[in-house]
Image: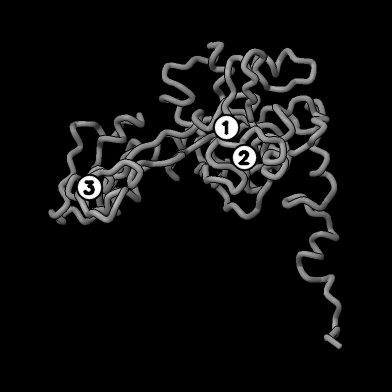
Amino acid sequence: MLWGCTNAIVVPPTFDAIRPNDFGVLLGANSADERSVRNVKMSWTDVKASANPLWAAGYQFYCLTPKTRHRVHSSWSNADWNLLWDSNFADPTRTDKRMPHVGEHQVNINPDDAKALGINDGDYVWVDANPDDRPYRGWRPEDPFYKVSRLLLRAKYNPSYPRGVLMIKHAPFMATHKSVLAHETRPDGRAISADTGYQANLRYGSQQSLTRGWLQPTQMTDSLVRKNYYGQGINLGYEADVHSPNTCPKETLVRVTKAEDGGLGGVGVWKPATTGYTPGNENEASRRYLSGDFLLQGWVWP
């Protein structure tokens, strides 16, 4: 049976202590708004037999957007040093003029997942989320704003993430009409608005191209006991900044497709990925080192 993206409370069918209200929203409904108000009680047997309709359309990656140590939300997101620390693609000289600034944001992806999609380390990729309302409601490929709002960023091989899981750091400064115009017309290619000086961290799109906050079932229970946000008081029900989702839920499904080669000018492979010393691209010497073959046999402290 095919279910929509539903907030399922997994309990035995006979467990009557939980009685959620689905507000008449059908299980097949797929929009984030409907998903935010509908909760259903389902057995594990039913949940296990269900399927997400987005999965069949290629949206098979769970995208995480955690905060980074180098910024506070978007604050200092366009400070040169922060970008240099925060990005594997940092380059103070911007040798590749496709870069929006001296660094750019990236999606961390398991190398095996990337290779299965024909994506090399350092390639630019499109990352798309639920087309029901991402990157915006009613979008069409021919819309001028779709070009501005569809997320494009670099793919970075990162074996520390399991297959099927992606990571994009939280809160880059989004692309705007003016930053895209600058990026496409300035001789140096910088994505900086001509009249305001607004510096985008992305060539196109934003974190909001993918993410959509929604509340889990327990966060909508008026009888939920919780501590007040300020002070030491205990109260009931939803409390902003206690339950409000920040960035995106782990259930955000996205699709990744290759957009451009990572090499200079969009030709070939991003050069650092060809050295044999980067994760997911190890040469024989690197593999030997990682396996411990470089340890001196029989050596002891004097």
Kind of residue at badge 1: Val
Kind of residue at badge 3: Lys
Q: Is residue 49 left or right of residue 100?
A: left
| Residues at marks 3 and 1, CA–CA distance in whole angstroms | 32 Å
Residue 99 sits in quarter: top right
Question: Is 57 in front, or is 86?
Answer: 86
User: Considering only vertical position in the picture, is 29 above or below 85?
Assistant: above
Q: Secondary structure at mark 1?
A: strand
Q: Are marks 1 and 2 in contact (CB under 8 Å)?
A: yes
Question: Is 284 in front, or is 200?
Answer: 200
Residue receiving disc 1: 127
Q: Position of residue 279 (x, y in %)?
A: 73, 52
Q: Tell me which label, 2 or 3, sits earlier in the chain.
A: 3
What crowding class fits label 3: few (fewer than 14 Cα within 10 Å), some (14-19), or many (20 or more)?
A: many
Q: Is residue 102 left or right of residue 165?
A: right
Question: Is 92 in front, or is 259?
Answer: 92
Q: Residue furthest front?
A: 231
Kind of residue at badge 2: Val
Q: Tell me which label, 1 or 2, sits earlier in the chain.
A: 2
Residue receiving disc 2: 107
For the rendered model, the colour scheme is one colour
Q: Position of residue 273 (x, y in %)?
A: 79, 44
Residue 3 sits in quarter: top left
Residue receiving disc 3: 41
Of badges 1 and 2, nearer the viewer stands 2
Residue 7 sits in quarter: top left
Q: Tell me which label, 3 or 1, sits earlier in the chain.
A: 3
Question: Is 57 in front, or is 282?
Answer: 282
User: Considering only vertical position in the picture, is 99 above or below 160?
Assistant: above
Residue 199 image label: none
